[in-house]
Amino acid sequence: MILNSDSMKPIYVQIAEWLETEILSESIKADEKVYSQYQLAEMLNINPATAAKGLNILADENILYKKRGLGMFVSADAKKIISVKRRNQTLKSLVAELVREAEHLQVTEEELITMIQEAKREMKGDT
C-alpha cells in the first residue's frame, strides 16, 4: 500500500479504505486476523496511533471485531457491509457528479448510458 500524503483524505481513512479493498478482493478473508496497529505503523512508516484510528473506524462499522489479547479480525459480514457502504456513499456521489457534469455539457441520458456501456466493455476488453 502506498499512502498519498498530498491527498485531502487523512492517512487513517486511507488505511481503512485500503483494508476494505483488501477484504473486498478477498486478500483478507472473513474471520482472518488483520494487521495490528504496530505492523501497519512499521509497514507504512506512520505513528501507531494513526494506524489504530484506521482500524477503529472499521471496528466501529462492524467490519472488524476485536478478540481480546489476539487482535482484530474480519467479521463474517464485512464484504456485505463494505459493499453497501460504498454503493450508498462513494458510488452515489460519483454518479451525482457525473450527472451534474453531463447536464452542464448537455449530454443526454441516452448518450451517458452509451458512454457507461462503452466504458464497461473497454474494462472487460471487449473493444
Image (cartoon, helix red, strand yellow):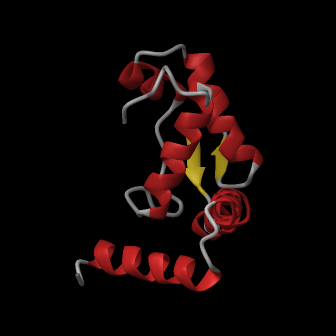
127 in relation to 62, above or below = below
Q: Could you tell me residue 33's position as x and y percent? A: 48, 48
Answer whether residue 70 is visible to the viewer in this image.
no
Answer whether residue 96 is visible to the viewer in this image.
yes
Among the 4 quarters of the image, the one containing residue 101: bottom right
Among the 4 quarters of the image, the one containing residue 92: bottom right
Quadrant assignment for the C terminus: bottom left
Among the 4 quarters of the image, the one containing residue 83: bottom right
- The residue sitting at the front extreme is 106
Residue, x 50% and y 21% (percent of image)?
6
52 in relation to 105, above or below = above
- Total numbered labels placed on residues in the image: 0
Taking 121 as reference, is 94 left or right? right
Q: Could you tell me residue 120's position as x and y percent? A: 39, 77
Residue, x 76% and y 45% (percent of image)?
60
Q: Could you tell me residue 125's position as x and y percent? A: 23, 78
Taking 29 as reference, is 91 left or right? right
22 in relation to 29, above or below = above
Quadrant assignment for the N terminus: top left
- The residue sitting at the right extreme is 60
Observer-nearest of 55 and 106? 106
Taking 52 as reference, is 46 left or right? left
Residue, x 64% and y 68% (percent of image)?
106
Residue, x 39% and y 73% (percent of image)?
119
